[in-house]
Image (spheres, rainbow, N blue to C red):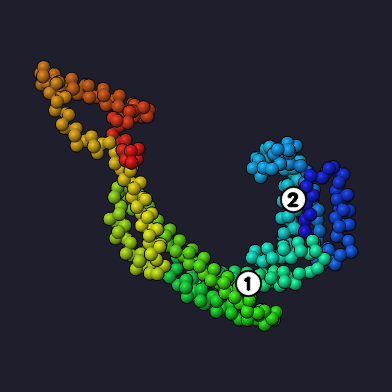
């Protein structure tokens, strides 16, 4: 246990005094505290004030490191190193049982008696988490790489594989029906998590397929994807459920909308009507003579093309004459 003393009045001289206070706290004639003292290695670490500006104390978690006092930052780094060093020789605990164990330890410190119910709950939570975690690991090993069509069978095989270990724990520690109910609840939750992951992996494969079709340069991709969709139903069966298929369709529609918005350019509207404007302009040039009019029009066309290219390169071209202007993207 690392006891953290925050904002000591004198950091330079308080280390020994803090250790004396901790020892006196732990050596009080109290059976609960005696058990805490004997069961753990006790370390103490002092952390000075993070800032001298009091209004900032309520939002220290939002302040950048540059605004905190250097001695505070250094003390936090030392605390982190201390914790990592001690964790190298610590016994790992199942995450699901940590909450119950912490409640048990707090109860030991605050009260004079040992809570048997909390200890039993922490003990059972530890074994439930251990078996449930092993169930998930074995299920993924049996199923292979996800997405897998054999996930359901793999989970059944995984549960059968740890049944002997489960029965041995129940027999050795005389655990009742409550333990079995909680273990089955954990198994069902783990099954749901693995099935969700399997479906998400199928959906990820579909998204890759949609992006591949979209990157081919096609503006309209739904016709191609409509051919691929039945293949996914046939390949993945129940995994490609109605909810997953609905998400797949929505994703394809979103990509289709973005493709159409990027494909429809101003040139698609301007080019079809350009001949209707070209003849009146040409008529103005050849009015004084066909040859001289065509040459003049050609010179003016080259000049205008040069100006157009320069403005387009500089990004100063007005949108109403930019042939690459994405109409639907800016005016949906």
**In the image, what residue occupies the spot 14% across and 21% down?**
284
**In the image, what residue occupies the spot 52% across and 65% down?**
193
Q: Are marks 2 and 1 in contact (CB under 8 Å)?
A: no
Image x and y of residue 296, in percent: 18, 20
Q: Secondary structure at mark 1?
A: helix
- The label number, if any, that marks residue 156 in the structure image: none
The answer to whether 220 appears left or right of 89 in the picture is: left
The CA span between labels 2 and 1 is: 32 Å
Q: Which residue is mark 2?
A: 79
Q: Secondary structure at mark 2?
A: helix
Q: Which residue is mark 1?
A: 128
The answer to whether 217 appears left or right of 85 in the picture is: left
Nearer the N terminus, badge 2 or badge 1? 2
* Viewer-closest of 39 and 304: 39
- Is residue 154 positioned above or below 231 on the image? below
The answer to whether 135 appears left or right of 315 in the picture is: right
Q: Work out which quarter of the rendered image holds the N terminus and state it.
A: bottom right
């Amino acid at each position: 246990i690392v006891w953290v003393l925050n904002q000591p009045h004198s950091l330079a001289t308080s280390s020994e005094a803090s250790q004396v206070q901790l020892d006196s706290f732990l050596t009080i004639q109290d059976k609960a505290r005696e058990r805490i003292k004997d069961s753990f290695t006790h370390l103490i670490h002092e952390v000075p004030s993070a800032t001298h500006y009091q209004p900032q104390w309520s939002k220290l978690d939002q302040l950048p490191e540059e605004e905190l006092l250097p001695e505070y930052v250094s003390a936090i780094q030392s605390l982190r190193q201390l914790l990592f060093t001690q964790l190298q020789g610590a016994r790992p605990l199942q995450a699901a049982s940590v909450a119950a164990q912490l409640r048990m330890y707090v109860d030991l410190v605050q009260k004079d008696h040992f809570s048997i119910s909390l200890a039993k709950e922490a003990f059972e939570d530890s074994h439930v988490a251990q078996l449930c975690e092993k169930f998930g690991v074995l299920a993924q090993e049996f199923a292979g790489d996800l997405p897998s069509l054999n996930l359901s069978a793999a989970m059944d095989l995984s549960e059968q594989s740890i049944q002997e270990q489960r029965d041995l724990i129940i027999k050795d520690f005389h655990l009742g029906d409550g333990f079995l109910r909680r273990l089955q609840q954990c198994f069902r939750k783990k099954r749901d998590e693995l099935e969700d992951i399997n479906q998400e992996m199928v959906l990820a494969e579909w998204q890759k397929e949609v992006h591949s079709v979209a990157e081919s340069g096609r503006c309209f991709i739904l016709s191609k994807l409509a051919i691929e969709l039945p293949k996914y139903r046939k390949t993945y069966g129940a995994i490609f459920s109605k909810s997953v298929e609905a998400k797949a369709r929505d994703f394809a529609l979103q990509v289709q909308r973005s493709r159409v918005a990027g494909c429809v350019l101003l040139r698609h509207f301007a080019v079809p009507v350009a001949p209707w404007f070209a003849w009146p302009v040409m008529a103005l040039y050849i009015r004084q003579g066909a040859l001289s009019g065509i040459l003049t029009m050609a010179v003016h066309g080259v000049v205008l093309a040069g100006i157009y290219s320069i403005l387009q390169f500089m990004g100063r071209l007005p949108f109403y004459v930019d042939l690459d202007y994405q109409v639907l993207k800016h005016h949906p």
